[in-house]
Image (cartoon, rainbow, N blue to C red):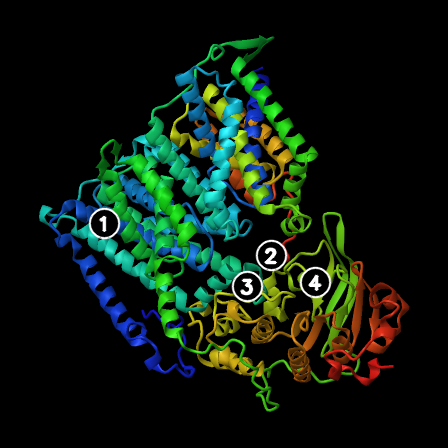
Amino acid sequence: MSIDKGSAYTTNLPTPPAAPTSAVPLWARPRTIRIATTIVLSASAIVLLLFPLSPSRSAQNTVIIALVFAIGAVGLNIVTGYTGYLSLSQFAFVGIGAYTVAILARAWPDVSPFAWVPIGGLLAAAMACILGLVTYRSRGPSFVIITIAFLFLVQFIAIEWDELTNGTAGITMPLPDWPREWGNWPFHLALVVLLGLSLLMSWWIRRTKFGLGLIAIREDEGKAGTVGVTAPVYKLLAFGASALFVGMAGGVYAYYLGFVDPVNMFSILFSVQIVLSVILGGRGTLFGPVLGAFLIEPLNTFANNVSFGVIQGGGNLRLVMFGSLLLLLVVLLPEGIVPSLKALVERARAKGRVGLSGARLAPLSSSTTPAVTTERAPAHPGPARALLEVRGLSKSFGGNHAVDDCTFTVPEGSITALIGPNGSGKTTVFNLVSGTLLADRGEILLDGERVDRVAPWGRAHRGVGRTFQITRLFREMTVLENIVTPLRSFSIPRLGVPAVSGAEASRAMELLDFVGLAAYRDVRAGSLSYGQQKLIELAQVLMLDPKLIMLDEPAGGINPTLIERMGDLIRDLNRQGKTFLLVEHNMPFVLGLCDPIRVLAKGHVIAEGDPDRIQKDPAVIDAYLGDDYLLERKPAPAAGLVTEGSTR
Amino acid sequence: MNVIQALVSGLLVGAVYALMASGLTLVFGVMRVVNLAHGAFAILAAFLTWTLWSGLGLDPLASIPILSVVMFGVGWLAYVLIVRHVRNRHMSMTILATFGIALLLEGVMGFAWGNQSAAVRTAYTDSSVTIGPLYLPTVTLIAAAIAVVVLVSLKVLLDHTWAGRAIRASSVNESGALLVGVSVKAIAATTFGIGIATLGAGGAIIAATYPFIPGSHYQWIARLLAIAVLGGLGSLPGAVIGALIIGVGEQLATLWLGASWVVAVPFLVIFIVLLVRPQGILGQRLREDAVA
């Protein structure tokens, strides 16, 4: 695994012009880093594999326990690093696996406890899926609190369900049934294999559509839904995956210890140790969690055995150490070791290179390949059929009726505008139509089909695409990753497809060309300017290939050139058959581009019609444009867009 | 009749829980920080009470004013040294930071006072008042009275002083408060300090009513979180209602299911409330369309 960000999946793509290698110091060159990483990883793997050759039983013990923590950390990384859900109950899955194996081994004393290890893993994964279901309702801090409650409830069950778990007394495991001279080898090798499998799974997840979806959820779960990521299924699978090998490791761990009890198996400190490992090593990296685990467990052993004069090692010192370490990490090194090292290398490489940011836009060639080829609608059908129909839509926030009995249509093939004063409910209508919010009352029909109870991803799959007033790109992803995240359908096999590949990748590049930002392919989306992000968000929505494209203030807060380009792009796409619904305050832009226009005030539509009619409608002038609108209008920045019809 | 006894005891204990939870929910309301160290600060105050009592012979009730000042300082310091730096990070990171404080405090208390169970015994420890068939320990009655006094003072402070209005303004709209001249930074530190200062009384009550060890903070933070979550994180009246419900619930669980179930009550409450009604009883469902 190379250190190069994104190298795992940028296959089949032309590489952007590289910087002259002479400018990069030798140690930071990709080749040097690649060789160094390979050497370090191979050496660590060999040492780890052969560690029981060490004569020290206590060192062997430390490594075996560190292996258990490393497996736990690699698992937690899937949930915390990739998906963004912090859990303080990860060690509970070690405990669940351990108890499963101990209980089964007690029931069938003739069978080797190793035989039950896979069952321990499956049960732990099933329990983790239940925790994953919880995320459907609670996120952020609520979720962390729930994981603490989960841990203590599992411990409570282990204590109280006496006949199964033998209560606080715990269960004693049979002695190993192999020759004495084998020593710890079977335990050690079993754990090494489990760690290898965990890493393989983590690597696989990161480079597939599944992993990309998880990262989208981490970056912005609401947005991920609107581009077709079926978040609940993703999270369920991620939680299951995060505990599968951890449960198995728990089974091996129980056999190694020879004893399971509720206090040690469900101590919150062990879960904290796993969290520490993940953060110290680096969230979201492949090897970071393993590195963290192998740094912290020896420290833990040390803290348990050391004594300085009056200060005895053991429980209290461990608490002080974990507490301080947690504080230091969160305050000083929240990124972790591996990402910090990567950043160091990146900086050395970027030194002396002119950045891309601020470069002028590539000219929009008129011969751009049509970005949209499917689902073409006739340019101007006779009596326009309504692609979107909104009937009696209402939504209140407390006493504020943001949308109140709102009814309008978007004719197929049109560029429909939704205008109105601030607070008139435009954005709420957008959120209701895209499914980010659920309506209190009313119906939303897409192509004649009710969608108002469909989840956001379901609406995305049916062909609704939207942008946000304040752009919501997945900031930590590259531009290209952002564009390939949208999914027009959901299927389990598709989760295993490489994140960026083949036809999809070339289409993404086409779209980037279309918005004129191809040069920014590998740039982190969060580092782009606001206007650039707007264009990227448009390209992202186009990747979804929606029937209806909803743009929330496409011309808001960007410079006149960009406004003009935005207008050209919209017109271009419309000619290719796309239907648009847009919210916008820039009146010249709206009047030059849109027909029909719906005017919203106090949550319902007060007027609708073509631009000419809207401008003369007294109700509209009263509620939105103002009496001085006609007198004061000057040539606006985007004057080129103003059509004959709008100048009187 | 046992049920009535349980109800009355539950309400009295609930008043104390309300006092303890008020700081937690105040801090969340103003700065969106879930302070997992709240229980550890309470146990710290309890140990300080114990030291004042065993060393100077100070009655736990008399030590409340001293402790409130000390705990304000401790809270202010914790804010300035740690919480301030992580406040604007992802909420999970602030949770981890406060959990780090809790572990650190637990370890430090272990070194300072040992891991043996401590308790303060006063003249009124074993006395009780009997009203008809009801049996009410004097300590619990005094504790509930103190809790009510502290809660009412807190309410007055928040509703009728400039500092209180500034705190509420910051909790509703931080940048708005900044614009109208509230020093949001100082207010945040003060709020955190006040939140912890309420534990001066809380810790004294714990010391006089329950035996405690450094590790007791888990049990307290679980209970207090359950209360705050049930009432609606950030809502002070919600915390009071939640505390009374949990207080009565624990007594009834002891009565009907056995004492060991008391441990599980908070966790069950947290689980169920966050799944069924994440905003709690009085918490407001935030408008989520801007930030999901």
Disc 1 crowd, CA 10 A, few/some/many (<14, 14-19, 20+): many
Name the image quarter holding residue B273: top right
- The residue located at (39%, 56%) in the rendering is A77
Residue occupying the far left of the picture: A181
Say yes or no: labels 4 and 3 on the same chain: yes
* Front: mark 4 or 3: 4
Residue tagged by mark 1?
A: A64
Assign a secondary structure to mark 1: helix
Pointer 2 residue: B291
Q: Amino acid at mark 3?
A: Ala
Question: Label 4 is found on which chain of the structure?
Answer: A
Q: Chain of mark 2?
A: B
The residue depicted at 60 percent of the width and 26 percent of the height is: B150
Q: CA distance from mark 4 to mark 2?
A: 13 Å
Tag 3 residue? A224
Q: Chain of mark 1?
A: A
